[in-house]
Image (cartoon, grey):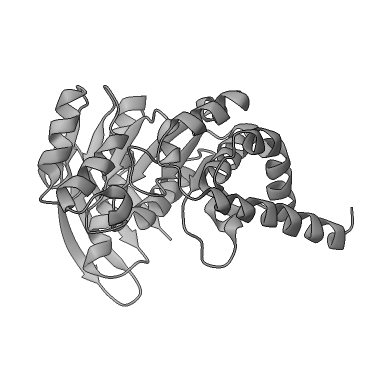
C-alpha cells in the first residue's frame, strides 16, 4: 500500500471515529463492558495504573510512563485530549500509534462498536486496549476521560489507582459541588487495590471510599516528604523521602506544581513496585 493510500485509509477511519460523536457521552459501563466482551477482554492482558482527578493527571501519567519505560517495561500510555492528532492519545514506549496501526485498530473494533452504537470515547478506549494487548504491553498508564466512576476506562482493575487534586469540571455530568465531583473521581478505587491521593481537602471522601472497599489508602503528604534543591527555568531537582527510601528526582518540568506532580508519579511507582516485589532505584531523571 502506497503512502497516499495509507494516508487516505487513516483519514477515512479517523472520520469514522469522529462520526461516533453523534452518540454523545454515555456515562455508564454497561455498554463498554459489552464492547470489551465482544473484543475478548483486551484490557485483561496487561497490567494497568489508573489515574483520575481534575488537575495534573496528564503530567503525572506521562511522568509515570517515563519511569516505567526507563525501568525496562513495555509501557502503554492512554491520555486525553490531544494537541495535534488523536494518535497522541495512544502511546507505547513514548511513541504515538502510527496512522497505519490506528487504521487497523479501527478496523478491529468497527463491527463491535457499530453494533453497540459505541461513543467516540468508548470506541477509542477499545482501540487503545486492543492495541496494547496486541503489542504485548507489560503495563499501561490509563488516564480517565471524564470523571471516574462511569468513565469508559473504568472497566479496568488496576494494580494501583491515583487521584490528583479536584476542582470544578464537567459539572453537568459530575455534579454541582466539589464533594459530588470528588465522589465521581473516587469511583476508580477498586476493592483491595492500593489508592494514592495528592493534596486535596476532599481526601476524606477518597479515604471513606477506600475504607468501604478495604483498599490500602495513602496520602502523599503522609507517606513522603519532598525537599526542593533547585527550581529553575530549565529543570527542577528535589529529594523525595519516605520511611524506606531517599530518592533524588530531576524533571525538565518547572514550577512548584510539578514538584507535586513528579512526587506523585515517583511515589506511585514505589507503591506499584512494592506490590510487584520490585527493587526501587535511588535516582530518577525524567525528561
Residue sitting at the far bottom: 233
- Name the one closer to the observer, 256 or 184: 184
Tell me where residue 209 appears, x and y as whole percent: 18, 31
Residue sitting at the far right: 1
Residue pictured at 57% horizontal, 40% vertical: 118
- 252 horizontally vs 191: left or right: right
Tell me where residue 204 appears, x and y as whole percent: 10, 40
- Name the one closer to the observer, 74 or 87: 87
Q: Is residue 178 above or below residue 42?
A: below
Residue 212 sits in quarter: top left
Residue pictured at 60% horizontal, 32% vertical: 133
Residue 93 in view here: no
Tell me where residue 36 appears, x and y as whole percent: 55, 29
Residue pictured at 60% horizontal, 54% vertical: 96
Q: Is residue 69 above or below residue 213?
A: below
- Name the one closer to the observer, 236 or 268: 268
Tell me where residue 199 appears, x and y as whole percent: 15, 52
Amino acid at each position: 500500500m502506497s503512502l497516499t493510500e495509507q494516508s487516505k485509509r487513516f483519514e477515512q477511519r479517523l472520520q469514522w471515529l469522529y462520526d461516533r460523536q453523534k452518540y454523545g457521552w454515555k456515562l455508564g459501563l454497561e455498554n463498554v463492558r459489552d464492547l470489551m466482551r465482544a473484543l475478548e477482554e483486551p484490557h485483561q492482558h496487561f497490567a494497568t495504573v489508573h489515574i483520575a482527578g481534575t488537575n495534573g493527571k496528564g503530567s503525572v501519567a506521562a511522568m509515570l510512563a517515563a519511569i516505567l519505560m526507563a525501568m525496562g517495561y513495555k509501557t502503554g500510555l492512554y491520555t486525553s485530549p490531544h494537541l495535534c492528532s488523536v494518535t497522541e492519545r495512544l502511546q507505547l514506549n513514548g511513541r504515538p500509534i502510527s496512522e497505519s496501526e490506528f487504521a487497523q485498530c479501527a478496523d478491529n473494533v468497527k463491527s463491535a462498536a457499530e453494533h453497540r452504537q459505541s461513543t467516540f470515547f468508548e470506541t477509542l478506549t477499545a482501540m487503545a486496549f486492543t492495541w496494547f494487548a496486541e503489542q504485548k504491553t507489560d503495563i499501561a498508564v490509563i488516564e480517565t476521560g471524564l470523571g471516574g466512576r462511569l468513565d469508559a476506562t473504568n472497566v479496568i482493575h488496576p494494580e494501583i489507582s491515583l487521584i490528583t487534586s479536584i476542582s470544578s469540571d464537567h459539572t453537568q455530568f459530575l455534579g454541582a459541588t466539589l464533594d459530588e465531583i470528588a465522589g465521581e473521581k473516587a469511583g476508580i478505587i477498586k476493592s483491595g487495590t492500593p489508592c494514592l491521593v495528592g493534596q486535596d481537602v476532599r481526601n476524606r471522601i477518597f479515604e471513606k471510599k477506600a475504607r468501604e472497599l478495604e483498599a490500602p489508602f495513602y496520602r502523599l503528604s503522609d507517606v513522603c516528604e519532598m525537599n526542593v534543591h533547585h527550581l529553575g527555568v530549565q529543570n527542577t531537582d528535589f529529594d523525595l523521602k519516605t520511611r524506606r527510601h531517599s530518592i533524588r528526582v530531576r524533571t525538565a518540568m518547572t514550577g512548584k506544581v510539578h514538584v507535586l506532580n513528579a512526587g506523585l508519579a515517583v511515589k506511585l511507582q514505589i507503591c506499584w513496585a512494592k506490590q510487584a516485589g520490585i527493587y526501587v532505584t535511588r535516582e530518577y531523571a525524567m525528561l
